[in-house]
Image: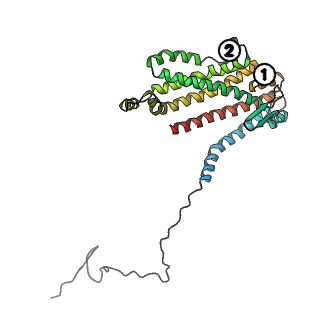
Amino acid sequence: MSSPVRLVHTSAGYLPPSVAAPQSAEIIPYPNAPSVQAQEVPIKLPHPLAEKARDVAANVLPTLIMLVVLLGIWQIACGHEGATFPSPSKVWTESREVILHPFKNVTIDGWHIKIQDGGDVGIAGHVLRSLGRVAFGFSLSATFGIALGILIGQSKTAYRALDPIFQILRTVPPLAWLPISLAIFQQAGPSAIFLIFITAIWPVILNTAAGVQNIPPTYRNVGRVLSLNPFEYFIKIMLPATVPYMFTGLRVGIGMSWLAIVAAEMVQGGTGIGFFIWDSYNSSLLTDTIVALIWIGLVGFALDRIVGWIGRRVAREV
């Protein structure tokens, strides 16, 4: 009688010992294999200035490329003989003096700026004259506009009654106010200030009043629970909630102020960037007019960005 066959249990089932795979195998290292040890690899963070430069390049480079493309199209379209509109190369050739010497007869001594009276002034002198008028008129419109907006915004009845009137007045073009301002003040300087004031005040009033109207009810309830007096309520509740609305109106207002003063100076004469444009047109210096338009656009862009930057700083502080 033959002896029974011993089977070994494996993953493939029960097999004879000669067939079954070994339960374990010895791992033989590769000869002369280098030992590998984990090493800490330092992570190099980009320099803050490099990140800032990259962000600036990402924002500015597309604009510069588009500007070059537009200048190229302009040059191709107007660079041929018989073109009625000057090309960029012609603007540079004929208005080089205006471009290279913008501060002609303008003396800057610290914070004191002296501009020679008369028309023989560089284009920057005319811009500074206009900015002085805008600064005064816009300051008045901002002060009265914010105050009136806060008062009107606290009364729903007053807001509903006055909002349609303000909406109508804000659509009146700046030049339409010029005859009224001349009739009231009889002088070009005060008339220009009034024109800036009456043009810029409406968006400031409307946006400030809207901000007061849109204060969340929970904020008002917090003020009542804490028994805040009117001054504390204004500083801690109303001002932080309405600052974004205020500066939205101020940004619109500063742009309208710049538009108004240019239009007023074109009609009234004297000095200012508006007068420079009109004088260049009457002298058939179309290239000087184009240079002035570029200055107007750049200054308007800068004013908008400055007011927006101030608004962001104020919003963080309050």
Instruction: Specify few, some or many for label 2: CA neighbours under 10 Å numbering under 14, 14-19, or 20 or more.
Output: many
Residue designated by label 1? 270
Q: Residue furthest bottom?
A: 1
Earlier sequence position, callout 1 versus callout 2: 2
**Left or right position of 147 against 9:** right
**Left or right position of 46 against 221:** right
Residue at 59 percent of width and 35 percent of height: 308
The label shown at residue 65 is: none
Type of residue at label 2? Ser
Q: Is residue 114 above or below residue 188?
A: below
The answer to which image quadrant residue 146 occupies is: top right
Task: Compute the Cα span from label 1 to label 2.
Answer: 17 Å
Q: Residue furthest top?
A: 183
Q: Nearer the viewer, residue 17 or 226?
A: 226
Q: Nearer the viewer, residue 199 or 55?
A: 199
Q: Is residue 261 above or below residue 101?
A: above
The answer to which image quadrant residue 172 occupies is: top right
Instruction: Specify few, some or many for label 1: CA neighbours under 10 Å numbering under 14, 14-19, or 20 or more.
Output: some
Q: Regarding mark 1 in the picture, which secondary structure is present there?
A: loop
The answer to which image quadrant residue 112 occupies is: top right
Residue at 63 percent of width and 46 percent of height: 56
Q: Regarding mark 2 in the picture, which secondary structure is present there?
A: helix
Residue designated by label 2? 181
